């Protein structure tokens, strides 16, 4: 690789440009290192095993700082909830504020202490660092959609959920997950951008594709209230930082239609052979990270969403035909608080029953060796764990035909007998409508 062109060198000597570089070096460097999801991604296939012992959201080292800042200046206990998985927690926002303050102070001190007008070699390594972090994150996000594990299709219980009861985040998740080709296309764009960023010759194209992709992601996160606004906005800003040195050339080509010199990345070494070796290392790292992300999500797909994924013994949506409580049949009245309308078995160990008013209630479901079914509440209001609660329903399950289920036993210590019939999931328009080239009339139902 060649050295950066003279125009770039002259621009780097501009005081504003130099201070901007110093600020970005500190701010985005700390962001990428402290947001541990990014370094874990670069571990490739090893990350799957490392995450068993260290959580990707492990930021306990910064909890004392964010907790003190949150309590002192904002009156909140800004400590990370590691079991949340949300990226917009109060602790994250406070941490970003702390990083911002550190970056401003460090930039001022750096400017006073260091009188050099440019840092070409540091710029080269920082650019590489940002490319790898952005590329790795895009590969992780992209494979989660290309192998559709991030936004799976609606569960059986979600097919019964009234649209108006869904949160905006659920609407987005189900909308994307209802069309695997659409979700996989979104993922393919992110994977392509990530791979391009690992190759120096295509890094600018990768940054431009990343900018467009992250703009779309940030827009959906903002408009559907997805708790990843911090991460998506910073990935977009990193894309802009990578494109900034090439902005004049891009404008000349795409806007002014003028010729421009070739796009180049700053050299890591003065020796050409070392630079060539560095290029191949970057390409290998991109392949390594892509393989790790792809393998990780493929295993998740096979275990949880594929054709061989485990399902409940009585998998399906079951409509209640007859419901007898205390020896008395209950008519299907929407005002009845005891009768069920449907019972849904989807994933192993869980069940969902629907009350007559439409409310869906999740429960733990355990099929015992003697054929009995025990239903236990998901939460324990007494402060214990759900597993220690006695079941609220103990039922013997008989299935005389594949689509008929008989449940007899006790419900809240009252004798009950329930007759149910299985519903074909493809009877729902969302699953059966399919694709049509020719439509004389739009189909909105």
Image (spheres, rainbow, N blue to C red):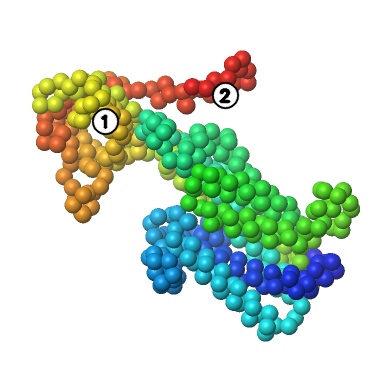
Q: Is residue 164 above or below residue 250?
A: above
Q: Is residue 335 left or right of residue 139?
A: left
Question: Looking at the image, do the residues carrying marks 1 and 2 touch, with CB atoms under 8 Å apart?
Answer: no
Crowdedness near tag 1: few (<14), some (14–19) or many (≥20) residues, C-alpha within 10 Å: some
Image location (x, y in percent) of residue 105: 59, 77
Q: Is residue 70 left or right of residue 212?
A: left
Q: Is residue 53 above or below residue 141?
A: below
Q: Secondary structure at mark 1?
A: strand
Q: Nearer the viewer, mark 1 or mark 2?
A: 1
Crowdedness near tag 2: few (<14), some (14–19) or many (≥20) residues, C-alpha within 10 Å: few
Q: How many marks?
A: 2
Image location (x, y in percent) of residue 258: 89, 51
Along the line of sight, the residue nearer the viewer: 264 or 170:
170
Residue in view at x 48 percent, y 51 percent: 227
The residue at which mark 1 appears reads as 355
**N-terminal-most mark, 1 or 2:** 1
The residue at which mark 2 appears reads as 435
């Amino acid at each position: 690789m060649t050295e950066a062109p003279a125009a770039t060198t002259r621009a780097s000597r501009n005081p504003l440009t130099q201070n901007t570089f110093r600020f970005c070096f500190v701010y985005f460097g700390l962001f990428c290192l402290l947001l541990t999801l990014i370094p874990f991604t670069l571990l490739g296939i090893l990350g799957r095993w490392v995450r068993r012992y260290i959580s990707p959201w492990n930021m306990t080292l910064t909890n004392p700082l964010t907790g003190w800042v949150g309590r002192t200046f904002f009156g909140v206990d800004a400590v990370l909830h590691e079991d949340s998985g949300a990226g917009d927690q109060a602790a994250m926002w406070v941490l970003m504020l702390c990083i911002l303050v550190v970056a401003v102070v460090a930039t001022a001190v750096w400017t006073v202490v260091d009188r050099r007008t440019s840092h070409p070699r540091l710029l080269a390594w920082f650019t590489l660092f940002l490319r790898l972090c952005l590329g790795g994150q895009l590969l992780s996000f992209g494979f989660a959609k290309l192998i559709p594990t991030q936004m799976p299709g609606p569960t059986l219980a979600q097919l019964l959920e009234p649209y108006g009861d869904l949160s905006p985040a659920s609407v987005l998740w189900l909308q994307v997950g209802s069309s695997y080709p659409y979700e996989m296309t979104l993922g393919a764009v992110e994977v392509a951008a990530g791979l391009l960023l690992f190759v120096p010759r295509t890094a600018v194209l990768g940054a431009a594709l990343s900018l467009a992709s992250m703009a779309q992601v940030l827009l959906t996160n903002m408009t559907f209230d997805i708790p990843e606004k911090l991460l998506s906005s910073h990935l977009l800003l990193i894309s802009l930082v990578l494109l900034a040195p090439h902005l004049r050339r891009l404008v000349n080509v795409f806007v002014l239609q003028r010729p421009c010199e070739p796009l180049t990345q700053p050299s890591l070494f003065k020796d050409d052979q070392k630079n060539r070796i560095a290029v191949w290392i970057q390409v290998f790292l991109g392949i390594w990270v892509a393989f790790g992300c792809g393998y990780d999500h493929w295993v998740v797909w096979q275990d949880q969403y594929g054709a061989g994924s485990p399902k409940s013994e009585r998998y399906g949506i079951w409509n209640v035909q007859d419901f007898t409580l205390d020896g008395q049949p209950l008519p299907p009245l929407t005002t009845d608080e005891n009768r069920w309308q449907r019972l849904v078995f989807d994933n192993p160990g869980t069940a969902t029953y629907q009350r007559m008013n439409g409310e869906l209630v999740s429960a733990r479901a355990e099929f015992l060796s003697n054929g009995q079914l025990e239903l236990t509440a998901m939460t324990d209001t007494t402060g214990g764990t759900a597993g220690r609660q006695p079941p609220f329903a103990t039922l013997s399950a008989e299935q005389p035909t594949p689509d008929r289920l008989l449940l007899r036993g006790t419900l809240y210590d009252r004798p009950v007998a329930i007759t149910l019939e299985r519903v074909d999931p493809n009877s729902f328009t969302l699953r059966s409508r399919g694709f049509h080239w020719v439509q004389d009339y739009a189909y909105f139902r």
